[in-house]
């Protein structure tokens, strides 16, 4: 059985919903990573499109 697993916050999903999904799978969060996703505009400027959030979950030992 895996001791750690990655959980990504999906489009349209809240952080709270992702954490609930982790708990249902038997994991608790131990690390959080955020990565901006950029989009280049026609005029050459760059805007932040969204933040990708990913949690590293550790298996909850019973």
Image (cartoon, grey):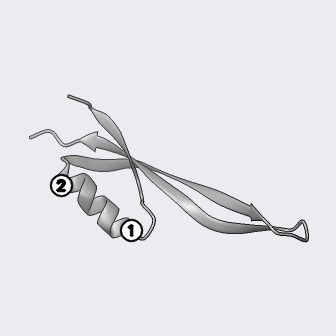
Name the residue located 73 percent from the left edge and 63 percent from the top edge: 39
56 over 38 or under it: above or below: above
Q: Position of residue 12 (x, y in %)?
A: 42, 71
Give the x, y percent position of residue 48.
70, 67
* Tag in front: 1 or 2: 1
Q: Quadrant of the N terminus?
A: top left
Residue 25, disc? none
* Front one among 58 and 11: 11
- Image coordinates for residue 16, horizontal then vertical, percent: 33, 68
Task: Find the residue positioned furthest to the right.
Answer: 43
The kind of secondary structure element at disc 1 is loop
Q: Quadrant of residue 49?
A: bottom right
Query: Which residue is disc 1 drawn over?
Result: 13
Q: Left or right? Give the position of 31 relative to 36.
A: left
- Location of residue 33 with respect to 46 vertically, above or below: above
- Up the image or down, 41 lies above or below 2; here it is below
Along the line of sight, which residue is nearer the eye, 40 or 52?
Answer: 40
Q: Nearer the viewer, residue 12 or 58?
A: 12
Residue position for label 2: 24
Q: Position of residue 35 (x, y in %)?
A: 60, 54
Q: Residues within 10 Å of mark 2 (few under 14, many from 20)?
A: few
3D distance between C-alphas at marks 1 and 2: 15 Å
- Residue at 24% x, 46% y is 27
The secondary structure type at the circle numbered 2 is helix
The residue lying at 19 percent from left, 43 percent from top is 60
43 left or right of 5 in image: right
Say which residue appears at 45% left-offset and 65% top-offset. Answer: 11
């Amino acid at each position: 059985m895996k001791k750690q697993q990655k959980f990504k916050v999906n489009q349209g999903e809240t952080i709270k919903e992702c954490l609930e999904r982790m708990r249902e799978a038997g994991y608790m969060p131990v690390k959080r990573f955020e990565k901006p996703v950029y989009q280049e505009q026609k005029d050459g400027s760059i805007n932040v499109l969204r933040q990708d959030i990913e949690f590293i979950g550790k298996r909850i030992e019973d």
